[in-house]
Image (cartoon, rainbow, N blue to C red):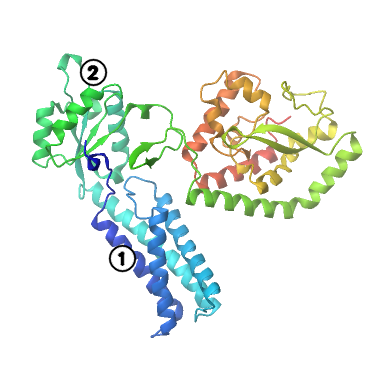
Amino acid sequence: MAANALRIHQHWSWLTLLHRAVDALCIALALAAACLVEYPQRETLFWGAVAIAVFAFLAELTGLYRYWRGAPLRGELLTALATWFATLAVLAVSAFCGGYRLELSQTETLRWIVLAAGGLTAARVLTRWLQLALRVRGINTKNYAIVGINELGFQLARNIDQAVDLGLHLQGFFDDREEDRLPAIPAEFGQSAGDLDQLVHLARTGQVRQIYLTFPMRAEERLNRVLTRLSDTTASVYVVPDFFVFELLHSRWTQIGGLPAVSVFENPFYGVDGFVKRSGDFALACISLLLLGLPMLAIAAAIKLTSPGPVFFRQKRYGLDGREIRVWKFRTMRVCEDGPVVTQATKNDSRITPLGAFLRKASLDELPQLFNVLDGSMSLVGPRPHATAHNEQYRQLIPGYMLRHKVKPGITGLAQVNGWRGETDTPHKMEKRIEFDHKYIREWSPWLDLKILFRTVLIVFRQENAY
């Protein structure tokens, strides 16, 4: 097979060119508005041109101009803003190292930054709104077909139907098998179906623009046969392998020596997302320590005065990718278990000191984990770390248990704010906690982190399920 046949080409359209032009215009107009003069100085115009060039270059690195059709708007907005602020950082470093100075006051510079960010955001919001308005009315839509009358094909059709912004209209289901071997098509899709000969005719005449193949991965020979037939058309053809029916954790495409590969289990925090996550953790941890420093000193003194033993308790836990970390906590028990067997705390546990009971009820014993956040071994939000002994126990009982370690553990998490906080004395409770941990990894966004932090504060005040 020729090398070109293995290559996946990047989607390119007039909309991509328009986005580049509009972004450049936003930066230029924002600079002109910031100057509040009719003719900006030559040096200012130069830096404006440099900013546009740097932004265009960084946009290629951040993937700003990738194919966003069907992707959440917040992801595109976050990428655009991150690209803009990275551009400003490059300009600042270049100016400092080269001994140059932008002929703008601090007020004008701030105005430029804000106006450009607002313009980049507004342009994308307006574009999405216009696209959606057109596609709802049947304008700028494409007919698509699904090859493979099976459950995966039906689920794909449902997903596309719910994503109105994709602008896709189902032409029908097609299959190369005998009719008596085909399952019934759900009534919601009608009875539009046919064989490959009909599909090839529709594709050749332009009545079908996109084709999705939903064959089982084991059907390699069948897949090759269908692809050969469709290669005689100009339709865009996509393969949706049936491993997508499994639970995927932030899958993404990558390339290995030019060959495409898709990750099945992946850490969602790479590129811009990773920078945003880590920056937010570090900033909020610093602010929290400044605000809570004195109360933490008071708690430490109270622990030392009310019971013998150390102030802090450091326990072995699994961190990112299953690597061992030491998690800081205020000591709340008369014992410090950290061996191959760790007994979970229960209600009215005799090992818990009177002060420890209060600290655990108010979740104040977790505050020292802010130091774990600062050193990068933990995050503010993520799956709660379990004792190593519990990890080894439950990884044998719950399928996919270890996938929760594809991200850093957190001081609080989605499971905890949904009622699965405290003792996990039954496998069902741990299964529900793992279910929410996986959901967090799949659906992560900065807004989800903020929502979890806010709900955590409310739960701490209600003091639910903590002992």
Q: Is residue 186 visible?
A: no
Q: Which residue does the numbered mark 1 point to in the structure image?
A: 21
Q: Height in image: 91 above or below 301?
A: below
Tell me the number on the disc at residue 115.
Answer: none
Q: Are marks 2 and 1 in contact (CB under 8 Å)?
A: no
Q: How far across and how far down the image is residue 373, in percent?
A: 66, 46
In the rendered picture of this protein, how many numbered marks are placed on residues?
2
Q: Position of residue 118 (x, y in %)?
A: 43, 64
For the N terminus, which image quadrant? top left
As helix, strand or loop, the secondary structure at mark 1 comes to: helix
**Quadrant occupied by the C terminus:** top right
- Mark 2–mark 1 Cα distance, whole angstroms, equals 49 Å
The residue located at (34%, 55%) in the rendering is 65
Q: Quadrant of residue 27?
A: bottom left
Q: Is residue 183 above or below residue 23?
A: above
- The residue under label 1 is which amino acid type? Ala
Establish if 389 lies above or below 204. Answer: above
Q: Is residue 274 left or right of residue 158?
A: right
Q: Residues within 10 Å of mark 1 (few under 14, many from 20)?
A: few
Residue 327 at x, y percent in the picture:
71, 37
Measured from the top left, where is residue 30 in percent x and y? 41, 72
Quick check: 303 above or below 174?
below
Residue at 40% over, 79% down? 45
Kindly give the residue lying farthest to the top in the view shown.
180
**In this image, 18 relative to 265: left or right?**
left
Q: Earlier in the sequence, mark 2 or mark 1?
A: 1
Seen in the image, is 196 located left or right of residue 408? left
Neighbours of disc 2 within 10 Å: few (<14), some (14-19), many (20+):
few
Q: Which residue is mark 2?
A: 183
Residue at 24%, 48% in the rendered image:
135
Query: Is residue 84 at least partly visible in the picture?
Result: yes
